[in-house]
Amino acid sequence: MAAAPVDARPDTRPATPPAGRRARTTALIVACALFMQNLDSTVISTALPTMALAFGESPVRMNVALTSYLLSLAVFIPMSGWMADRFGARTVFRAAILVFTVGSVLCGRADTLSFLVGARILQGIGGAMMVPVGRLLLLRTVAKGELVAAMAWLSMPALIGPVLGPPLGGFLVDHFSWRWIFDINVPIGLAGFVLVTLYIPDVREAGRVRLDFVGLVLSGVSLACLMVGFETAGRGMMDARLTAWMLGTGTLAGLAYAWHARRVAAPLLDFTLLRIPTFMVSVVAGTLFRIGVGAVPFLLPLMLQLGFGYTATESGLVTLASSAGAMAMKPAAMSALRRFGFRRTLVWNGMLSACFLLVTSCFRPAWPMAAIYATLLVGGFFRSLQFTSFNTLAYADIPRARMSAATSLYSTIQQVSLSLGVTVGAATLEIAMRVGGDALPSLLDFSVGFVVVAACLLAATPVAMLMPRDAGAEMSGQRGG
């Protein structure tokens, strides 16, 4: 029998990278895009007074540049899963990066407040697609056994961006121009677009569903009103009656959406996913945890500036210690989950995170800086590990066909809970000031604020105990109980 002919032509196809390297590459690309979005949402805050002078506006009115972005996020995040299924996750993710980058260019060219608000809304549309669709890309291209390590990279932008944003914004405004806070996104966005095209596969799911337009309107009204209400409650940014009206309208629209979602086959936000125990625990316990952590970027810089007499730049540099802790967490996450499993990690690590926030409530100007830095460093480590655990466990038992719906719902709840954290921190500070009769918050008022948000972290522990001991074992690689 003649031997089969040998094809001597060289194989010009690109070699498929090993699974571990592919997971790491995908996670890093998505993390860079999410970092850009998280950084941009906070870097603008320190530039608002300078921008107000440039536009000839009141600094108070400039807050609309923040709320317009948050509104855009709130309205468009719920439809991100449908967009990914309809047009492909990679296509939508690339488009989101491009839209966000174009919005950044327009923000940097703005010469009036109305122009800036329009550009920020465009940025918000891009950001609303980047966060959940980026996570969806990771879930569809990374094996479950590698997801913990990959998710560790995605947890860091959520912690580093809000901390790095204010000091970076202050530096750029002081030494360059406020326009640079938007222009820095351009090279990151263009690089991200190219890297996604080259290194992330186009994974699509079969089947298409109609867009739940009624659900989009109801959820958009609900989330927009709630986000504005949460952002302005107790902060003097809006008339108290208007804030109350926003919160009431948002609640009613949310109830109307819940009624609507029970009567359609494919709702925009599918609450039946909460019947999956691991997803339910991640949502409920994760929401309580994020409310507490979401207050920290609001409370800590204010305490350092008003209570310690630090400048904005000095307080920003101190809070960077928590980012360093988040970076240190990445290589430890897999080892911790493999050794202890999700349940024990979430219970004990959650209590440790709460303890370090309680220590933060005791900060005083007489404390050695080494002790303050050490507390923030270790606390940042534990909080980052908790974020990674929640963000991974949420998808442990989600069927592949429902993954896009899960990312939409999870990302929406994340966004609301982090905003609610600022509200809880601001409201607690306001109440403590009124009880103490203080015109400005004292160190004791800040201590009360940190105790309250630490209690939110601690409240997540009983919820985490509801899951079985072997929950998420396939992801963590846990052996035994």
Image (cartoon, rainbow, N blue to C red):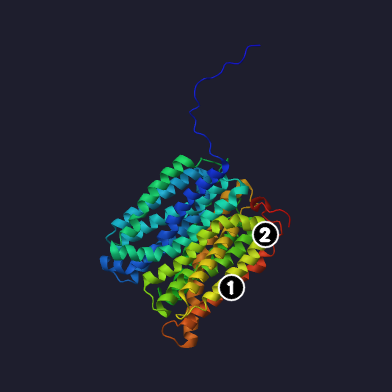
**Residue 229 versus residue 192: which sits nearer the camera?**
192
Q: Bin the neighbour count of mark 1 within 10 Å (Cα to Cα): few under 14, some 14-19, many 20 and up.
A: some
Residue 318 position, x and y percent, is: 43, 69
Q: Bin the neighbour count of mark 2 within 10 Å (Cα to Cα): few under 14, some 14-19, many 20 and up.
A: some
Residue 119 position, x and y percent, is: 35, 56
Residue at 55 percent across and 66 percent down: it is 290
Assign the N terminus to one quadrant of the image.
Answer: top right
The earlier-in-sequence mark between 2 and 1 is 2
Q: Where is mark 2, residue-wise?
A: 340
Residue 184 appears in the figure = yes
Residue at 54 percent across and 19 percent down: it is 7
**Residue 243 versus residue 452: which sits nearer the camera?**
452
Mark 1 secondary-structure assignment: helix
Q: Which label was assigned to residue 279?
A: none
**Residue lying farthest to the right in this orientation:** 480
Residue 456 appears in the figure = no
**Residue lying farthest to the bottom in this orientation:** 437
Kind of residue at badge 1? Cys
Q: How many marks are shown on the rendered structure? A: 2
Question: In whole angstroms, how far apart are the C-alphas of marks 2 and 1?
Answer: 20 Å
Kind of residue at badge 2? Phe
Residue 240 position, x and y percent, is: 44, 76
Instruction: Judge whether 419 appears above or below 142 on screen.
Output: below
In the image, taking residue 427 as reference, residue 44 lies left or right, namely left
In the image, taking residue 369 as reference, residue 178 lies left or right, namely left
Residue at 62 percent across and 69 percent down: it is 351
Q: Where is mark 1, residue-wise?
A: 355
Residue 228 position, x and y percent, is: 45, 67
Assign the C terminus to one quadrant of the image.
Answer: bottom right
Q: Quadrant of residue 347?
A: bottom right
